[in-house]
Image (tube, rainbow, N blue to C red):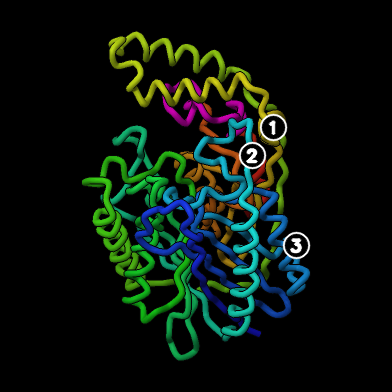
């Protein structure tokens, strides 16, 4: 019967109404994997995030046009910061908001793009064999909270190879905030875009897509030389070279006996200690800042802004009871865990270690955005991620326990 694969990509750089500096284009990537009558579709956007409302609209259009069930579609974002924020357009402010905005024009543009590239993906279907390669990234990114702390540097690569030996497509699973630039006044796919460009040239123009993983505490903060396009390109190309090295090593063939998805539902009451934490943090910061500099302190402004949001009655659906859906997708010898938010390295690496028989990919920013889910011990730390997370300290343990029932 065999495996069939089809892939396509399309530019989704928005119309430049705000006169932003556009360094390079943003893309949507579509990959279809077909085994018998069952097909699974991966859609990855060069956006900061996607939310459940947008995902539902996309899946509805896909089903009505192509008959593909929503359970056979996985939608995720790369979490590119120098890009449109996504849906809803408030993610740079975290999920603490009293104002939700949807760019209807851009949303419609993206849905139309999705429908076109799915057709292009179907048109390119051909029989392939599937291989996985494993390695690690070195000296390009790390734990962004504490330089010496552990971080997930795994690089997993799924490679789809035609009967003539040509690499048709690769899916790369890594964990890193693509924030060399991190500037909302410009548009760039940052290091991820430059990595893809370099790889595509070296691999004869093959399709390349990225599944960003447990990147909640990982970035280039302590590794980059500067914030510039030149540096984003340097890191992206170095990362591509490390991936090429991994591909040249021994690969293992992946056999797909089934493609099956399990959705796991969670419900959490939001934490209630944020207001007190923020007030203490603001007092602490103010104590050490000279009066003349208080208006210029970006750190102080940020925490004052967060406190103001906490005091307002938020209309965000995530602000009261947090309802979350994670997914485990059996993909033959590989398992995929899709999480609608940002988990830390410690959590991701623990999830990867549970199933000894299958290679586990962690996919963050998948099908919704619900913010940071911190390890329990990080709830006492004086870190930004702790001040913007709505999840209670028990959330990580519950997440791991329930997901582990499906990791077999």
In the image, is 196 to the left or to the right of 45? Answer: left
The local crowd at label 2, few if under 14, some if 14 to 19, many if 20 or more residues have their Cα within 10 Å, is some
Name the residue beneath numbered marker 3.
60
**Would residue 343 be counted in the magenta stretch?**
no
* Residue at the far left in the pictured view: 225
Q: Residue at x 63, y 30 (%)?
A: 98
Q: Nearer the viewer, residue 158 or 294?
A: 294
Give coordinates of residue 216: x percent, y percent: 46, 41
Residue 160 image point, x, y percent: 49, 77
Does residue 152 appear in this view?
A: no
Residue lying at 57% horizontally and 45% vertically, measured from the top left: 89
> Can you see residue 210?
yes
Mark sitting on residue 315: 1
The quadrant holding residue 203 is bottom left
| Circle 1 crowding by C-alpha within 10 Å: few under 14, some 14–19, many from 20 | few
Q: Earlier in the sequence, mark 1 or mark 3?
A: 3
- In magenta, the rendered stretch is 377-396
Q: Are marks 2 and 1 in contact (CB under 8 Å)?
A: yes
Distance CA(mark 2)–CA(mark 3): 22 Å
Residue 385 among magenta residues: yes
Residue pointed to by mark 2: 100
In what element is the residue under mark 1?
loop
Work out how far the residue at label 1 is from the one at label 3, CA to CA, in angstroms. Answer: 25 Å
* Mark found first going from the N terminus, 2 or 1: 2
Q: Quadrant of the C terminus?
A: bottom right
Give how far across and how far down residue 42 sits, in percent.
59, 65
| Disc nearest the viewer among 1 and 3 | 1
């Amino acid at each position: 019967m065999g495996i069939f694969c089809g892939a396509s990509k399309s530019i989704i750089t928005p119309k430049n109404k705000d006169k932003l500096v556009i360094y390079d284009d943003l893309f949507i990537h579509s990959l279809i994997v077909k085994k018998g009558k069952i097909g699974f579709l991966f859609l990855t956007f060069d956006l900061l995030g996607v939310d459940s409302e947008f995902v539902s609209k996309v899946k509805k259009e896909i089903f009505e046009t192509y008959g593909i069930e929503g359970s056979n579609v996985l939608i995720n974002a790369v979490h590119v910061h120098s890009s449109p924020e996504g849906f809803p357009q408030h993610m740079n402010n975290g999920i603490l908001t009293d104002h939700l905005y949807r760019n209807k024009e851009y949303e419609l543009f993206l849905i139309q793009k999705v429908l076109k590239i799915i057709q292009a993906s179907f048109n390119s279907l051909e029989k392939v064999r599937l291989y996985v390669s494993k390695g690690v990234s070195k000296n390009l990114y790390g734990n962004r909270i504490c330089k010496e702390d552990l971080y997930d540097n795994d690089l997993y690569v799924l490679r789809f190879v035609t009967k003539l030996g040509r690499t048709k497509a690769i899916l790369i699973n890594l964990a890193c905030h693509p924030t060399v630039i991190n500037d909302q006044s410009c548009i760039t796919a940052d290091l991820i875009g430059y990595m893809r460009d370099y790889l595509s040239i070296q691999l004869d123009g093959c399709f390349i897509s990225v599944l960003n993983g447990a990147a909640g505490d990982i970035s280039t903060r302590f590794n980059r030389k500067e914030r510039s396009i030149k540096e984003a390109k340097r890191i992206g190309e170095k990362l591509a070279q490390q991936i090429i090295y991994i591909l040249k090593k021994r690969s293992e063939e992946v056999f797909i006996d089934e493609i099956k998805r399990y959705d796991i539902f969670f419900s959490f009451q939001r934490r209630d200690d944020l207001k007190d934490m923020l007030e203490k943090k603001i007092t602490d910061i103010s104590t050490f800042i000279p009066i003349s500099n208080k208006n210029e302190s970006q750190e102080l402004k940020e925490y004052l802004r967060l406190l103001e949001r906490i005091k307002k009655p938020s209309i965000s659906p995530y602000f009261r009871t947090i309802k979350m859906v994670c997914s485990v997708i059996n993909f033959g010898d590989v398992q995929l865990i899709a999480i609608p938010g940002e988990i830390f390295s410690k959590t991701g690496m623990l999830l990867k270690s549970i199933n000894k028989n299958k290679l586990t990919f962690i996919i963050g920013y998948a099908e919704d955005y619900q913010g940071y889910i911190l390890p329990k011990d990080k709830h006492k730390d004086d870190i930004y991620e702790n001040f913007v997370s709505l999840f209670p300290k028990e959330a990580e343990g519950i997440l791991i326990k329930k997901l582990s029932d499906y990791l077999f």
